[in-house]
Amino acid sequence: MERRRFLGRFFANVAAVTAVSGFFRRSFAGSKDYDPTKHYYGMGIQVDKCIGCGRCVEACKAENSVPKEPFFFRTWVERYIIKKNGEVTVQNIDSRIEKSNETFAEKDILRSFFVPKLCNQCENPPCVQVCPVGATFKTEDGVILVDDERCIGCRYCIQACPYGARYLHPEKEVADKCTFCYHRITKGMLPACVEVCPTQARIFGDVKSTASPLTRFKRMNKLHVLKPSLNTEPKVSYSGLDGEVR
């Protein structure tokens, strides 16, 4: 992006944010009748149920027009290999990503498992704090979104995210990330990754609803979040999470 074009977008968006002062933002909901104040979304992931099939990644790319290249993604799955000597190896399951030639003898492996990852939809999101034009914001129902019309592609939010959950879209030149498939959930549908999971490893729901599958998941399991020391308060919780996962 040319410097002049970047600065032009920056000052234009700063002016817009100043004028609007947060009182107006275009709607991202998939339904006109949707009321965000009545919902608050989260996701649960059962690590022991994930088989590393990658269908969630494929569905996400197809649903949200994520570039096909393997280094662009809104969600991904990591394979953890823990050896008996304590060494830990983490691999992205996408076969198109170049991997090391390291091989593992079955007798040396203590345990191996898969961990789905995505934007954690933080209650205290660092990405929102650093955005200079207000393009990244938190909705009333708890989802972190990016306004493409405001984003200037400065990459501040990408650097600020401690979970590596953002990337710069190569064509639109704006930040992109998981949105819980906001256009679907505001119409009463499930996120694409949840809908296609063959083992129901991903559980999506409304924490304000006592009948939500997520509410039951939280009640019946001991849960952990990624990087709890950062106090970002993620809304993505894991059951059966190994202490080696970061």
Image (tube, helix red, strand yellow):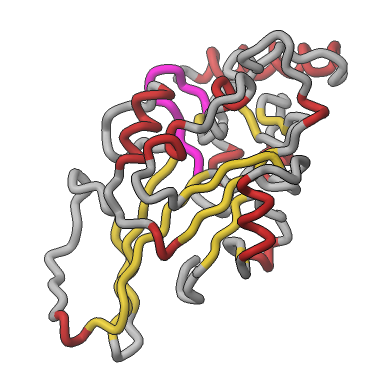
Residue 160 visible in image: no
Compare residues 228 and 153 and report the one nearer the observer.
228
Q: Residue at x 35, y 61 (%)?
A: 114
Please give the name of the residue rendered at 38% of the width and 21% of the height, measured from the top-left corner.
65
Residue 51 spot, x, y in % from top left: 31, 57
Q: Is residue 87 left or right of residue 15?
A: left
The question of residue 80 being in magenta is answered with no
At horizontal 41% and vertical 59% (from top left) the residue drawn is 115
Residue furthest to the top? 32
Query: Percent x, y for residue 127?
Result: 65, 41
Magenta region: 165-175
Image height of 161 relative to 185, above or below: below
Residue 100 shown left or right of residue 221 in the figure: left
In the rendered image, the residue lying farthest to the front is 211
User: Looking at the rendering, which quadrant does residue 14 occupy?
Assistant: top right
Residue 144: image quadrant is top right
